[in-house]
Image: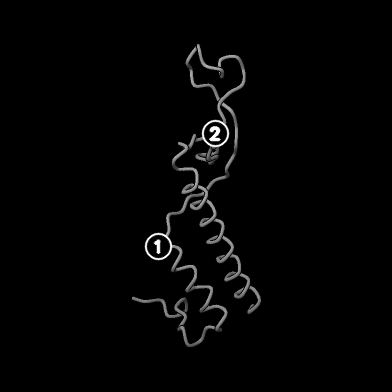
Amino acid sequence: MTDYHNYISRTKMTSRERQLRSQLTKLLSSKAITKGSLLYRKRRCGNPGCKCAKGEGHPGLCLVVREGGKQRQIFIPQHLHEKVKEWVACYQKVKDLQEEICRIYSDRL
């Protein structure tokens, strides 16, 4: 049984709401997405003869995520840096679109 009070016909939406929902659907259906923050940091590779053993460290990119109340850092391989940046940006765009849609409904109350 469909709950008709929660269903909204596209004809009853404002053009702005239709536009926002369309952008949101497009992002969610065609883009990879991940939640987290990006952090540049240096780390040691473990090779005792490497320059990083003396404290310099290798520059790298980490994805910082919260799981079960704990913070976790996931090191991103160099060849995935740009992709992961896009995934995080996509998550932020989805979040922004959802916030704007929610504001439309809050304004209607």
Q: Which residue is drawn at 57% across and 79% down?
A: 16
In front of the other: 76 or 96? 76
- Say above or below: 4 vs 54: below
Q: Using the image, tell me which numbered label, if any, was put on residue 4.
A: none
Q: Residue at x 39, y 64 (%)?
A: 29
Q: Residue 23 location, x and y as percent? A: 49, 70
In front of the other: 95 or 53? 53
Q: Which of marks 2 and 1 is nearer the N terminus?
A: 1
Type of amino acid at the residue the image marks with label 1 = Ser
Q: Nearer the viewer, mark 2 or mark 1?
A: 2
Q: Residues within 10 Å of mark 1 (few under 14, many from 20)?
A: few
Q: Could you tell me which secondary element the residue under label 1 belongs to? A: helix
- Say above or below: 30 vs 15: above
Q: Could you tell me which secondary element the residue under label 2 belongs to? A: strand
Which residue is denoted by mark 1 in the rendering?
30
Q: Residues within 10 Å of mark 2 (few under 14, many from 20)?
A: some
**Distance Cα–Cα, label 2 vs label 1:** 28 Å
Q: Residue 80 location, x and y as percent? A: 45, 43
- Say above or below: 28 vs 21: above
Q: In this view, does 38 lie to the left or right of 4?
A: right
Q: Residue 36 location, x and y as percent? A: 54, 46
Residue 28 position by quadrant? bottom left
Q: In which quarter of the image is the N terminus?
A: bottom left
Which residue is denoted by mark 2 in the rendering?
60
Q: Residue 94 location, x and y as percent? A: 52, 61
Q: Residue furthest left?
A: 1
Q: Quadrant of the C terminus?
A: bottom right
Q: Is residue 33 left or right of residue 93?
A: left
In front of the other: 56 or 67? 56
Q: Which residue is drawn at 56% across and 66% down?
A: 97
Type of amino acid at the residue the image marks with label 2 = Gly
